[in-house]
Amino acid sequence: MNRLNQLFASKKDNLLSIYYTAGYPALNTTVAIAEALEKAGADFLEIGFPYSDPVADGPTIQHSSEQALINGMTLNQLFEELTELRKRVTIPILLMGYFNPIVQYGIERFCKKAGELGVDGVIVPDLPMYEYEELYSSYFIDNNLSNIFLVTPQTSPERIRKIDELSNSFIYLLSSSSITGGSLQLTANIEDYYKRIKGMELKNPAIIGFGISDNATFTKACQYANGAIVGSKFVKLLSEEGYMEKIPGFIKSIKQ
Amino acid sequence: MKYGVNDHGYYGDFGGAYIPEMLYPNVEELRQQYLTIINDEGFKAEFNDLLKNYVGRPSPLYHAKRYSEKYGANIFFKREDLNHTGSHKINNAIGQILLAKRLGKKRIIAETGAGQHGVATATVCALMGIECVVYMGEIDMARQAPNVSRMKMLGATVRPASSGSKTLKDATNEALRDWIANPVDTHYIIGSVVGPYPYPDMVARFQSIISEETKKQLVEHTGKELPEYVLACVGGGSNAMGMFYHFLDDEQVKLVAIEAAGKGVDSGHSAATTFLGHEGVLHGSRTILMQTPDGQVVEPYSISAGLDYPGIGPQHAHLYKINRAQYVSVTDDEAMQAGLLCSQMEGIIPAIESSHALAQLEKMKFKSSDNVVICLSGRGDKDLDTFIKYFNY
Ligand SMILES: Cc1ncc(COP(=O)(O)O)c(C=O)c1O
């Protein structure tokens, strides 16, 4: 049981997760932002580590990644900042980023370090299921890290079953096949997709991400899943002056 | 095929399909169908007919007499520069457009560096009446302006990639993002032996016509199928893989792959991937790429837009690691001189990419009986501006 499992055991609805890019807008803000988000009422967090070629991201997160790299963010720097994490933050924390920086850091070493620092899970969009299962899953399991898989409207039912089997905290439902920063679409097809997933009675909770930006989209998403993730909209807030003071109001505006 | 791909898409340690879930259905559809489709008799007949009557294949294997004298061996040029649209890129574009049609796709996207692959893709889309969007780095659009105009005239939309370093790798990122957003009706025609499995294998198969023809043509010229040396330049590695393909299992044939050293391998302005790169993941495959110790992709440099890529295809990474092919590098200056020499000694203005392969001849020692084949991957029309500026004509 890690913090994610405990959270999902105690709370099943309206879970709010926030994504932000470490090192943006400045270095040494990662834990302070996490602390502020916890106080404001976020249920769990995804901390992005930047990559030069983020193919699954739209302009907002691309920009935050570029700026974070210019600021000097690296995995070493992030882990340095996270030594404070569990002194100041109690909610579940996931790290999210692309596979190549992890490969260079060393996959086993990465999992070990993340586990030691109190990280609960990892989202690596370009780590394929086959390689995860065959080569790396033991590193994640041994360090009590949940690996989170994505599901899109095009993912086949058999594959969703397989993902459910390999997951041990939650499944990340994409609101549509898109890069980050789009807007939530609610066509008949998409509603069918959410209903189809709900009807599968998966063992893992489902959290909807990509395109969640305000109370309306958050509430909609929560009708079909256990919660939702806000990313680009929060990263935009971080580009504003006095963003720390604005965090409570931001979370309130989404949860209402 | 001893050096071919395994069932999971790997060549030794390299390859695979490191893609986000959003791309999985498209890539999986391709993986399941590509071999069935391209081995189908109807497909083969249509592919071969277009290669013959539209592209103008077989491309000649030309015995370059003055070069042979100069370098003391029998030097042959495989004339991919004579193909319709001016390079080897059309072989792959024809193959993939026929495949896309059979998959029922209605829209084509592509990335391009030098513009040769973009032009080839725009051309086959015009031929088939299919919508075409080509992503091209903003910097490349400026240095390969004639090709931008050609793509537009052929009816394609050219979208500038203005993120990151604004060159080929960013154009590839933008094309992948487009594909994520258009998961059902769009096929992505990747222009080299890079990307997630099955692309490296599929593109290599479409380009393998180069070495298939070469073997037959060598018999006519020399009475033997096998040369002593085969040379080709490497950006992502598609002309080289096509040129090597049917010689891979003939271990006595020495394969030489020429990378772009830019201003020098150690100058900080280079694209010599095997010299400067490390193992990692780029654009969906495990391969060798230029990167920082933290795993950020490093921006390469070469005077040649087509070689200005921070990685190489996974099969090349494998051939390099196990020493089946030799990887060398040639600087901007060496390539430009070689381009001029070929123009004035053989009356052929080569692409700057291909000039890199020609420049390697200066560094090799041959026996007079050696047969040496160089892939002349493209013609230099697109590079006239760069040549003129360089030589102050
Ligand atoms: C003429 C020519 N040769 C070579 C290349 C490099 O590509 P590849 O290494 O895939 O053959 C290009 C790419 O644009 C090209 O236009």
Image: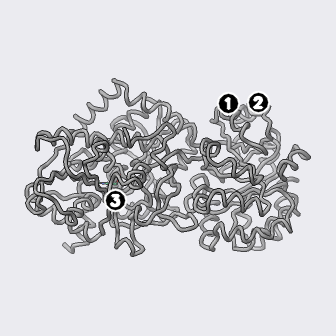
Residue B293: % across, % down:
55, 68
**Placement of B185 over or under A53, stated as above or below:** above
Q: Residues within 10 Å of mark 3 (few under 14, many from 20)?
A: many
Marks 1 & 2, CB-CB < 8 Å contact: yes
Regarding mark 3 in the picture, which secondary structure is present there?
Answer: strand
Q: Residues within 10 Å of mark 1 (few under 14, many from 20)?
A: few
Q: Residue at x 61, y 60 (%)?
A: A106
Quote the CA–CA distance across marks 1 and 2. 9 Å
Q: Residue at x 80, y 64 (%)?
A: A34
Quote the CA–CA distance across marks 2 and 3. 52 Å
Regarding mark 2 in the picture, which secondary structure is present there?
Answer: loop
Tell me, yes or no, whether dots 3 and 1 are on the same chain. Answer: no
Q: Residue at x 26, y 57 (%)?
A: B354
Q: Quadrant of residue B147?
A: bottom left
Residue B327's mark? 3
Residue A157's mark? 1
**Placement of B104 over or under A28, stated as above or below:** above
For the N terminus of chain B, the quadrant is top left
- Nearer to me, B220 or B86: B220
